[in-house]
C-alpha cells in the first residue's frame, strides 16, 4: 500500500477546482480533451494559488509489489483481498464492471473496473475505493543483458479522512482481508498456473481435476497418514512461527507410471483448496529466472515439479553446470543448488502455507542432496494396486460398497490374486471401465490378474533357470 497525501485523481481535482472557478458545463468536456500533463500542471498551480491542504488521505493498493531493476514483481495479496471483498459490495448504480463466470456454481462474479467507485462505511467512517488500470514499459537487467517488456498494472485507490488513518490501517484493512477469505473460500475455484517465459508471468486455467482422497486407490494406512500430515500442517501456523521454521511442507512422491502420483497431487489440491503451480524445470532459464518464478507464486499453494529425475539435467553442486537451451546470453543456467536454495531459503522465508511436491518414477536416480533428511518432509511410495486400492476403484467405477471384503463373490479371489502386486491402479481402472456390469467387469479383471500372474511366474522360472546355469558353469570352471 502506498500513501498519496493529495486528492485522488488529477481529473477529479481538476473538475473540483474548476467548479469553484465557475462553469461546470464548460469544464467537464475540457477535462476530457486536455492532455493529462497539462491537467496535472493546472491542478498544481490552482492548488498552490488556493493554498489548499486536503483532509483526504488516499492509499494506493497496486496489484503487484515492486518493479525493481531486476524485474522482480510479486503479487500484492492485499489487492486481491480488496477486489474479492468489493465484488460482494458493488453499488447497483455502477456502470462499468468486470465480469467472470464462476464455473463451480455457474454464478457470475462482478469486479470493479475503470472509473468505478465504491463507497463503504466502517465503524461510522466513510471510505471510497476506486479502480485505475494502466500499462507501462519496464526494463529487466539480468546478468548485464537488457530486456524491455510491457507491464499491465492495476491499482485501487482507497480514500478517507486523514484522521481515521490508524483505524483504517489497524482495523479496516484486516477486516477486509478476513471478509475476502470467507468470500474466497465459499466460491473457491482452484487454478493451475503454468509459467510463460514470454510474458514472464504465471498463466492460469481453472483446475477441475476430479481426484479426491475418496477416489484415490491407495493403501488405507498410508492415505490416513498423508491426510493426518496435511491436517497438522494447516493447523500449526503458530507452531511453525514459534520454532522458527518456514511454514512449508515438502513431499516426494515416487513409484512406477500409472500409480497415482499426479492424482495424489490433485487430491491434495482439492482437499486443501490450494492452487497448483506447475513448475516445468526444462523451461527455466537460470537461477534468476527460477527466483522470479517462485517469488510470484501466491501463498496457500502447491508448487509441483513432476518427473524431477528427467525434466532437466540438473548439475549437482560439484559438477559444472551445462548451458540451458534458450537461456539468455550471459545468464547463469539452472543448477540443483539454485533450486534447493530457492526452496529452502528465499522462497520459503517470504511465503506462507506453501507445499512443494516432487514426483519421480526413479527415486534411486535422484541426487542425494534432494533426498537428505529434512529436505522433503515425507517420502510417499505410490505402488502397484493392492486390495484396498482395488476396493476404492470398484466403488468409484462400479458403485460397489467399499466397506466389506466380500461385497462380491469374486472379491476373495481378487484379494488373493491382486496381493501379488501385478497391476497398477491405472491398469485396474482401465479393466473396470471396460464393462458397466459389475459381474462382467470383475470377471475380466480376474482373467487379467491370472494372466499377469502366470507371466510373472514364467519370468521368475526363466530367471531361476538362467541363474542356475550360470552358477553351474562357474562351478565347472
Ligand atoms: N492411485 C490411483 N487411484 C485412482 N486412480 C488412479 C490411481 N493411479 C492411477 N489412476 C488412474 O490412472 C490415471 C493415471 O494416473 P496418474 O497420472 O495419477 O499416474 P502417475 O503415477 O502420475 O503416472 P506417471 O508416473 O506416468 O506420471 C489417472 O488419471 C487415474 O484415472
Ligand atoms: Mg504423473
Image (cartoon, grey):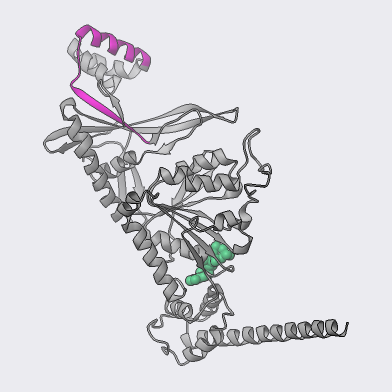
Q: Looking at the image, which residue is at 28% across and 49% down?
A: 181
Which residue reaches farthest bottom?
409
Q: Looking at the image, which residue is at 49% across and 26% down?
A: 137
Residue 445 in the magenta stretch? The answer is: no
Which residue reaches farthest left?
124
Provide residue 292's location: percent of width, then percent of height.
Answer: 50, 39
The answer to whether residue 214 shows anywhere in this view is no
Q: Is residue 71 above or below residue 439?
A: above
Answer with the quarter of the image where residue 232 lies. bottom left
Q: Is residue 220 left or right of residue 40?
A: right
Count of numbered badges drawn on the protein: 0
The residue nearer to you, when weighing 355 against 274, is 355
Q: Is residue 298 above or below residue 467?
A: above
The answer to whether residue 446 shows anywhere in this view is yes
Q: Is residue 432 left or right of residue 20?
A: right
What span is colored magenta in the figure? 37-63
Q: Looking at the image, which residue is at 68% across and 41% down?
A: 323
Answer with the quarter of the image where residue 40 lies. top left
Q: Quadrant of the C terminus?
A: bottom right
Provide residue 475's location: percent of width, then percent of height.
Answer: 84, 84
The residue nearer to you, when weighing 106 against 410, is 410
Q: Quadrant of the N terminus?
A: top left
Provide residue 94's location: percent of width, then percent of height.
Answer: 24, 37
Q: Looking at the image, which residue is at 24% across and 39% down?
A: 173
Provide residue 223's location: percent of width, then percent of height.
Answer: 42, 71
Amino acid at each position: 500500500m502506498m500513501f498519496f497525501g493529495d486528492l485522488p485523481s488529477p481529473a477529479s481535482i481538476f473538475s473540483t477546482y474548476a467548479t469553484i472557478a465557475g462553469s461546470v458545463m464548460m469544464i467537464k468536456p475540457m477535462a476530457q480533451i486536455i492532455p493529462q500533463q497539462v491537467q496535472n500542471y493546472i491542478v498544481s498551480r490552482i492548488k498552490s494559488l488556493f493554498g489548499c491542504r486536503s483532509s483526504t488521505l488516499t492509499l494506493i493498493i497496486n496489484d503487484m509489489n515492486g518493479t525493481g531493476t531486476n524485474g522482480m514483481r510479486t503479487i500484492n495479496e492485499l489487492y486481491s483481498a480488496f477486489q474479492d471483498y468489493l465484488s460482494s459490495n458493488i453499488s447497483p448504480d455502477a456502470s462499468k464492471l468486470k465480469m467472470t463466470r464462476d464455473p463451480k456454481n455457474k454464478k457470475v462474479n462482478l469486479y470493479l473496473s475503470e472509473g468505478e467507485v465504491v463507497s463503504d462505511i466502517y465503524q461510522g467512517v466513510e471510505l471510497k475505493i476506486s479502480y485505475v488500470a494502466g500499462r507501462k514499459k519496464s526494463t529487466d537487467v539480468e546478468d548485464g543483458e537488457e530486456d524491455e517488456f510491457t507491464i499491465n498494472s492495476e491499482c485501487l485507490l482507497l480514500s478517507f479522512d486523514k484522521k481515521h488513518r490508524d483505524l483504517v490501517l489497524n482495523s479496516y484493512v484486516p477486516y477486509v482481508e478476513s471478509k475476502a477469505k470467507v468470500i474466497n473460500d465459499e466460491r473457491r475455484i482452484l487454478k493451475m498456473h503454468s509459467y510463460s517465459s514470454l510474458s514472464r508471468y504465471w498463466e492460469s486455467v481453472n483446475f477441475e481435476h476430479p481426484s479426491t482422497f475418496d477416489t484415490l486407490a491407495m493403501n488405507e494406512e498410508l492415505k490416513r497418514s498423508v491426510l493426518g500430515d496435511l491436517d497438522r500442517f494447516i493447523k500449526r501456523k503458530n507452531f511453525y512461527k514459534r520454532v522458527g521454521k518456514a511454514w512449508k511442507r515438502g513431499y516426494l512422491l515416487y513409484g512406477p507410471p500409472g500409480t497415482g502420483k499426479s492424482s495424489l497431487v490433485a487430491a491434495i489440491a482439492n482437499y486443501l483448496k490450494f492452487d497448483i503451480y506447475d513448475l516445468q524445470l526444462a523451461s527455466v532459464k537460470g537461477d534468476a529466472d527460477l527466483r522470479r518464478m517462485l517469488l510470484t507464486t501466491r501463498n496457500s499453494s502447491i508448487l509441483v515439479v513432476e518427473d524431477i529425475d528427467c525434466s532437466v539435467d540438473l548439475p549437482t553442486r560439484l559438477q559444472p553446470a551445462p548451458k540451458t537451451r534458450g537461456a539468455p546470453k550471459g545468464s547463469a543456467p539452472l543448477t540443483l543448488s539454485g533450486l534447493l536454495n530457492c526452496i529452502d531459503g528465499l522462497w520459503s522465508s517470504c511465503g506462507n502455507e506453501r507445499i512443494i511436491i516432487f514426483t519421480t518414477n526413479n527415486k534411486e536416480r535422484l541426487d542425494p542432496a534432494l533426498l537428505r533428511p529434512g529436505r522433503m518432509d515425507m517420502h510417499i511410495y505410490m505402488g502397484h494396486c493392492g486390495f484396498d486400492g482395488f476396493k476404492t476403484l470398484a466403488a468409484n467405477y462400479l458403485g460397489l460398497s467399499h466397506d466389506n471384503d466380500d461385497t462380491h463373490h469374486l472379491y476373495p479371489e481378487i484379494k488373493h490374486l491382486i496381493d501379488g502386486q501385478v497391476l497398477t491402479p491405472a491398469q485396474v481402472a482401465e479393466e473396470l471401465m471396460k464393462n458397466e456390469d459389475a459381474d462382467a467387469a470383475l470377471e475380466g479383471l480376474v482373467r487379467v490378474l491370472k494372466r499377469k500372474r502366470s507371466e510373472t511366474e514364467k519370468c521368475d522360472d526363466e530367471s531361476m533357470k538362467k541363474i542356475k546355469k550360470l552358477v553351474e558353469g562357474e562351478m565347472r570352471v
